[in-house]
Image (cartoon, rainbow, N blue to C red):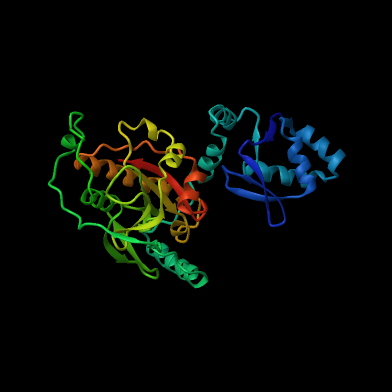
Amino acid sequence: MNNKYKISPLSYFTFENDGMELTNSKSKKTIRIDNKLLELILHMKEAKSYNEIEKFVCENLKIEKYNLEEIFNYLIKNKFLIKEGDKIEKYYELWKSYGWINSLIYHTYTYDYPVLDYSTPASYVRDQKTMKKFINQEDEPSIYKEVTGEKVNLPKVRTHSSKNFYEIFDVERQLNTELDLQLLSDILFYTYGQISSLKFPVTQKLIRRTSPSGGARHPSECYIAILNSALLKKGIYHYSVKNHCLELIKEGDFKKYLYESCYGLNQFEKEAEIVFLHTSIFPRNWFRYREPKTYKVIYYDFGHILYNFKLITRLLGLASYTIGSGLNDDNVERLLDIDGYNEGIIYFTAI
């Protein structure tokens, strides 16, 4: 063998089950690491020929040649080792140069991740058996979040006259409507409101909202902070999808706190009256889809929510701020009394 081999940059160590494991994000394989294998892997941080590897192993690790060949072939087959000059090195360095190493690990781990084809009868039966097993093991997460606190009923939602896309997004369109509780009610409903329910086999009743969600899981929740509006007393409220009302979480003036925690908010063309804090309840998704690719769906869902928010605010003649990915996550989550692991902040918008 004239080629040289080295450990793949997509191979990484974790500590699981009272020991060390090595995972490769490209092959999605994980192996248990003992001291000898650890020494071999560390030895191959730099590219080595097979003869060099064999010499090191025989002299230092006392591994028989036939065992080495079996180990070596397994590591190659499952991409723990790569040939020197493999294209993944170039792509790794490219992503690394932009600070995206952890993103590359997630991207490659979820790339071509095995999924169940729900269109086939056999998969449908298998899925139902799996869901029965999950439900027998644990409670299904609630489709609603309800908060104990003062309730604020919202006006009945209105149906709005239709305008075409070009009218709504006309750059000359005047966005100076005065905000009132009716408009706030419409905004919340047309981004998060429940429009119907449906029953899947085995699982609890699920809901449909005005913004679609993968698998009808709807992990997204909305909180609002009243900053400069006389509509409601200042504070943090949760929007109840179930009852189309607001639930007071904390009363107080949080303007300075949010302007320091929601980066870019001070670039809004006007002083924000209300900040919308959008979160995701992760168990709603992971209960049903127990594989890592589904984490991406949370952000697909929020793309729909963000678009609906932009659409309804412009339709109502309201200026809105929608570039709200820059956050001090910990500050906002402490304000909302959420832990960041079962429910976490995703984005903010403002009007």
* Left or right of 319 in this view: 267: right
Residue at 25 percent of width and 52 percent of height: 185
Q: Mark yes or no: residue 76 visible.
A: yes
Q: Position of residue 214 (x, y in %)?
A: 37, 53
The one of 186 and 1 positioned closer to us in this rendering: 186
Rendered location of residue 266, percent (x, y): 38, 32
Q: Residue at x 61, y 38 (%)?
A: 10
Quarter the N terminus occupies: top right
Kindly indicate the quadrant of the structure image that contains residue 325: top left
Q: Write the residue at 37% across / 30% down.
A: 267
Q: How many marks?
A: 0
Residue at the left extreme, as displayed: 161
Vertical arrangement, residue 348 with respect to residue 247, above or below? above
Q: 174 or 64: which is nearer to us?
A: 174
Quarter occupied by residue 82: top right
Residue 299 percent location from the top left of the image? 41, 45
Which quadrant holds the C terminus?
top left
Residue 293 appears in the picture as rendered: no
Position of 277 with respect to 167 (left or right) is right
Tell me: 49 left or right of 351. right
| Closer-to-camera residue (21/165) | 165
Q: Is residue 20 above or below residue 173?
A: below
- Residue 43: x %, y % from top left: 76, 36
Q: Residue at x 15, y 48 (%)?
A: 160
Using the rendered view, name the quadrant where residue 37 is placed.
top right
- Asked if residue 292 is positioned above or below residue 311 in the image, the reply reads below
Q: Is residue 274 left or right of residue 10?
A: left
Nearest to the observer: residue 90 or residue 215: 215
